[in-house]
Amino acid sequence: MVRIKPSVLKKACQINPLLPLLLPECRTIEAAQQELRWIQNEVSDKKRVRQCCMLRARHYPLQYLLGSQPFGPLDVTCQPGVLIPRWETEEWTVSLAEKLPRDMAFDIMDLCTGTGCIPLLLKQMCPKCSVFAVDRSPLAYKLATRNSNTLQVPLKIIKKDILERSSEIVPRTVDLITCNPPYIPRTTFARETARSVKLFEPKLALLGNKEFYANLVDCWMSRTDAFVYEVGDLSQCYYVLNRVTGDVDLSRKWRIGFRHDSCGRPRIVYGFRASGSRLNWASILVKFGDMKH
Ligand SMILES: C[S@@+](CC[C@H](N)C(=O)[O-])C[C@H]1O[C@@H](n2cnc3c(N)ncnc32)[C@H](O)[C@@H]1O
């Protein structure tokens, strides 16, 4: 990472002596000023504002300090030990929610739910749906429950390891599965992950690779009509595509697409049954991404 020039630090200090503490994370004076305003808005006590800035200098995440993160129309409570919702996830979740039918009752299950941000937003925007949310972390389970209660968005929250026998999680099939699994491979974690994430966000939420996409094909596709899975790179999209096209039965029954985020990075692999579903997924997901199969 490029070091901050002494001239920038000096200029920041002249504006406000707290700004240099925010520069290591914010990088520019303008971004540091914005962040200081956010902290001052949330924290009235001057001593506490300084403490927050000192924690930021040590790369402590802003959302853990302020206690929340906007996610679409919702303000989701954040706590250490549970992944902070990302803008990339918010972007596709809002786009998906806008495409789902509002006037129909159907079932959604969000796997690896963390704060519950994805199912909370889907349920908020499609109130007739029944929405399940699953996570193996006790902290995530507690926080998703708290978010569901405080936002008054009812979810059925389940504490379970999804890589274990999936049949025991919910008693039936669902119309749609969403999932943002841990997808950063160990080999790239140390090199490519931001320091604040490496130091302060839970490894359980971050480290993973093909196992969650293998689990999708092996366990979950038989129990849903459609799925939307976040990915970290194109190899994870192609893993799912190749597993489906390499299997005569799956290949005949399923359509698969990829979606990029607004920065042009691969972000989603999604799929739906070609026929026989309660909902017309081909028309719902028609402009969600690019069909590959
Ligand atoms: C990348 S985070 C996503 C959190 C949230 N959905 C979001 O988008 O902000 C992955 C989540 O998966 C959970 N997790 C990891 N392994 C799991 C497993 N085997 N079964 C269920 N949940 C798991 C972690 O606890 C974490 O909350």
Image: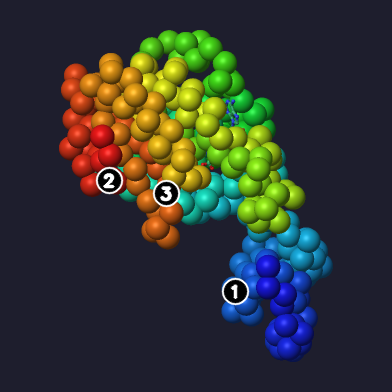
Q: Is residue 151 visible?
A: no
Q: Quadrant of residue 280?
A: top left
Residue 242, disc: none
Residue on which the image places disc 1:
31
Residue type (three-letter) at the residue carrying disc 3: Pro
Looking at marks 2 and 3 on the same chain, the residue that comes earlier in the sequence is marked by 3
Residue on which the image places disc 3:
266
Residue 57 % position (x, y): 77, 66
Q: Quadrant of residue 100?
A: top left
Residue type (three-letter) at the residue carrying disc 2: Asp
Q: Is residue 162 left or right of residue 290?
A: right
Crowdedness of circle 2 by 10 Å Cα count: few (<14), some, many (20+)? some
Residue 105 against residue 126 in the figure, above or below:
above
Which of the image's four quarters has the C terminus? top left
Between the residue at mark 1 and the residue at mark 2, the CA separation in whole angstroms equals 35 Å
Residue 115 against residue 156 in the figure, above or below:
below
Tell me the mark number nearer the camera, choosing from 1 and 2: 2
Between the residue at mark 2 and the residue at mark 3, the CA separation in whole angstroms equals 11 Å
Q: Quadrant of residue 282?
A: top left
Between the residue at mark 1 and the residue at mark 3, the CA separation in whole angstroms equals 27 Å
Pick the residue in front: 122 or 2.
Answer: 2
Crowdedness of circle 3 by 10 Å Cα count: few (<14), some, many (20+)? some
User: Is disc 3 placed on a helix, strand or loop?
Assistant: strand
Q: Is residue 170 visible?
A: yes
User: Is disc 1 placed on a helix, strand or loop?
Assistant: helix
Q: Residue at x 63, y 38 (%)?
A: 207
Residue type (three-letter) at the residue carrying disc 1: Ala
Q: Residue at x 37, y 51 (%)?
A: 260
Residue 290, disc: 2
